[in-house]
Amino acid sequence: MGSGSDIVVEGLSYLYKPARGREVLALDDVSLDIRSQEFIALLGPSGCGKSTLLYLIGGFLSTDKGSISVGGKPVAGPGPDRGVVFQHFALFPWKTVRANVLYGLEKLGLPRENMWVTDIKGVTGVKNQMTIEEPKTK
């Protein structure tokens, strides 16, 4: 694993240890290899560890076991090489999806010419929407 990859997760396990209540094993021996320009979807029921994995890759949580690297460098905390756009509570409802994504880059003082947001294949037009809607179930 890892040769030519931008994001490498190897043998990752994470145990939530709440102040009260029982511990929960959120991830157990997860490994994945994501190359540049690859689009990955994390699918699973609520509580299966999807968000935990993203928080770990983003550097917002520390790993218990295993390793994460981005661009060949170990993830030791949040950094300008990664961005996380939270699903609901951290978005500005008056901004477009594109403006929400660019907000963090602007706060870092990056020149505008270095910023770009593109539509993902099959999701054309999302970047200029005002909100991200939950999928409707039948």
Image (cartoon, rainbow, N blue to C red):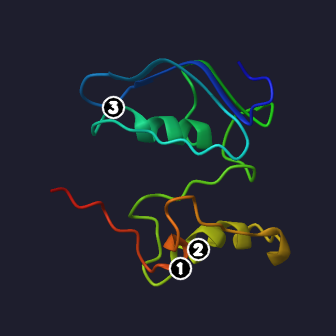
Residue 2: image x %, image y %? 74, 23
**Crowd class of label 2 (few under 14; some 14 to 19; many from 20; radius 10 Å):** some
In primary-sequence order, the first of circles 2 and 3 is 3
Q: Residue furthest bottom?
A: 94
* CA distance for labels 1 and 3: 31 Å
Residue at image location 59% in from the left, 77% down from the top:
99
Question: Which badge, 1 or 3, comes first in the chain's sequence?
Answer: 3
Displayed quadrant of residue 32: top right
Q: Is residue 101 above or below residue 70?
A: below
Distance in Å between CA atoms under marks 2 and 3: 28 Å
**Residue drawn at point x = 51 percent, y = 81 percent:** 95
Q: Measured along the vertical axis of the image, is residue 111 above or below residue 61?
A: below
**Mark 3 lies on residue:** 48
The residue lying toward the viewer, choosing from 94 and 135, is 135
Amino acid carrying mark 2 in the image: Arg
The residue lying at 15 percent from left, 56 percent from top is 138
Residue 54 is tagged as none
Task: Report the Cα–Cα distance between label 2 and label 1.
Answer: 6 Å
Query: Residue 106 location, x and y as percent?
Result: 72, 73
State the residue in front, 50 or 34.
34
Q: Nearer the viewer, residue 19 or 24?
A: 24
87 in relation to 97, above or below = above
Circles 2 and 3: CB atoms closer than 8 Å = no
Upstream in sequence: badge 2 or badge 1: 2
* Mark 3 secondary-structure assignment: loop
The residue to which callout 1 is attached is: 128
Q: Secondary structure at mark 1?
A: helix
Q: Where is residue 45, by image quadrant?
A: top left
Give the quarter of the figure containing the N terminus. top right
Vertical arrangement, residue 1 with respect to residue 92, above or below: above
